[in-house]
Amino acid sequence: NTRVLLAERPVNRAPVASDFKIERVPVAEPAEGEVLIRNHFLSLDPYMRGRMSAMKSYAEPVRIGGVMPGETVGRVVASRHAGWRTGDTVMAHTGWQEYGLVPGERITRIDTNLAPASHYLGVLGMPGMTAYCALLYLGEPQPGQTVLVSAASGAVGQVVGQIAKIRGCRVVGIAGSDDKIAYVRDELGFDAVLNYRNSDGVAKDFDTLSREVAGLCPDGINVFFDNVGGVVHDAALSNIAQHGRVIICGTISVYNELEKPDIGLRWMRQLLVKRARMEGFLVYDHAHRTEEFRQTMAGWLREKRVIFKEDVAKGIESAPDAFIGMLAGANRGKQLVRFSQD
Ligand code: NDP
C-alpha cells in the first residue's frame, strides 16, 4: 500500500514536495465491521491545504506523520461488514493511499450506471454539491440577474456558472489564464469573462480589477460566488448591487497565509451601504440535500445542460505535485489522481 503522509507543516508559504512523505506499507486486513477498499481515484481539494496548517478551523489538522486526508472512489476487496461485498463500487474518506480500511458505516455506494466513478468526486460529489447548494440556497439567483463567480473554471466554479445559466442569469467568470477563460466562455457559455492576472502572471491591482469588473457588470453583481478571497474579492465586492448576496465559499488566495493575524477583515462598509448579505458556506451543513442534488445534477448531465472537465494525474506518487500545482492554478478542471494499477 503506497501512501502519502504529512512530513512538515508549511507556515505562511506554499507547500513543497518535501512537506510530504511517500511510503510503502503492507496492506492491512479488515477487523470486524471494517471494509478494505482498493482505490481507483483520489480527489485533491483546496481544503486539504487548511488541514496541513495547525491553525484553528472547522476541522482538525492532520498530524505530522498522518496520512493526508481525502475522498476516494474504489472497489471493496475484502469485507467484514454485513452491508458490503467484494466488488462493490464505493466512495469513502480513505486519504491519499492506494488501499483504505474503513468502518462499514462510513462508506457510500455509488452507481456507475448513472455516471463515471470519477464524477462522484466532482460534479456529482462534494464540489458539485457545493456549487448547487450555495448558489441556489444562499445566492437565490433570479432570472436576468448577474452572477459573478471566481475560480470559474475549477471544480466548483464551472458548475456554479452552468447552474446560473440554467436559472436564466447573466454569468460572469473570473479565472487566471487565457485557456481557462476560453473554456468558460466558449465551452460553458458564460456571458463574460475576466483574467485576473496580467500577462506576466501576476495578479492585477485592485483599481484595474475593480474597473474591469464594473465594465462587465454594468448593473452591479447580484450574486457574487467567491472561491478565492483577496484582491479578486475586493474588486468584485466594490461592484456589488443593492441587496446583492455574497457567498464566501473559499478563500484560496490566502490558504498559504493562514498563520498571518489579519486575514479576512475588510470591506464591511460596502455591505452596509448596499444592504448586501454576505454568508459563509460549508457544504456539510447541506447533507440533507444530497439526494435532491444528485438526482437534479444527474438529469442535467444526461441532458448535457452541465458538462464537467477533469484533470487526472497518474499514480499516487504524483499526488503531492498535482496538489501543489492545483493551489497555484495548474489544474484544468477538477483535480483527481488515478491510481496506476488500473
Ligand atoms: P479549483 O478546481 O477551482 O482549483 C483551485 C483554483 O484556485 C486554481 O486552479 C486557481 O485557478 C485558483 N487560485 C489559486 N490561487 C488563487 C489566487 N491567489 N487568486 C485567485 N484564484 C486562485 O478548486 P475547487 O473548485 O475544488 O475549490 C474552489 C474553492 O472552493 C476553494 O477555495 C475551496 O476551498 C472552496 N470550497 C469550499 C467548500 C465549502 O463547503 N465551503 C467546498 C468545496 C470547495 P486560477 O488559475 O484561476 O488562479
Image: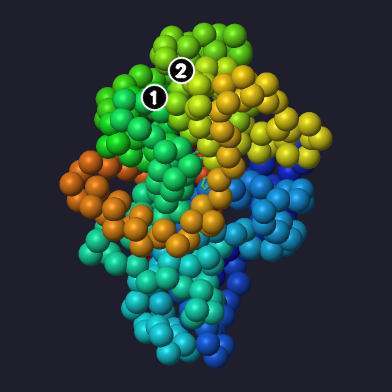
Residue lying farthest to the right in this orientation = 261
Q: Which residue is mark 1?
A: 146
- Taking the spot 27% from the left edge, 42% from the top edge, the residue there is 306
Q: Position of residue 325 (x, y in %)?
A: 54, 38
Q: In this rendering, would 244 be left or right of 342? A: right
Q: Determine whether the residue tagged by mark 2 lies in a helix, strand or loop.
A: loop
Query: How far apart in space, not on screen, are marks 1 and 2 (Cα)?
Result: 7 Å
Residue 293 position, x and y percent, is 36, 55
Q: Is residue 282 visible?
A: yes
Q: Count of labels shown?
A: 2
| Residue 178 position in % (x across, y down) | 40, 20
Q: Measuring from the top left, give residue 264's x and y in whole percent.
A: 70, 32
Q: Quadrant of residue 270?
A: top right
Residue 220 is marked as 2
Does 223 sit above or below residue 140? above
Q: Amino acid at mark 1?
A: Thr
Quadrant in the picture for the N terminus: bottom right
Say whether residue 202 is visible: no
Instruction: Residue 141: name its quadrant.
Output: top left
Q: Is residue 342 above or below residue 267?
A: below
Side (left or right) of 121 relative to 308: right
For residue 187, side relative to residue 210 (left or right): left
Left or right of 291? Residue 213 is right
Residue closer to the observer: 193 or 310? 193
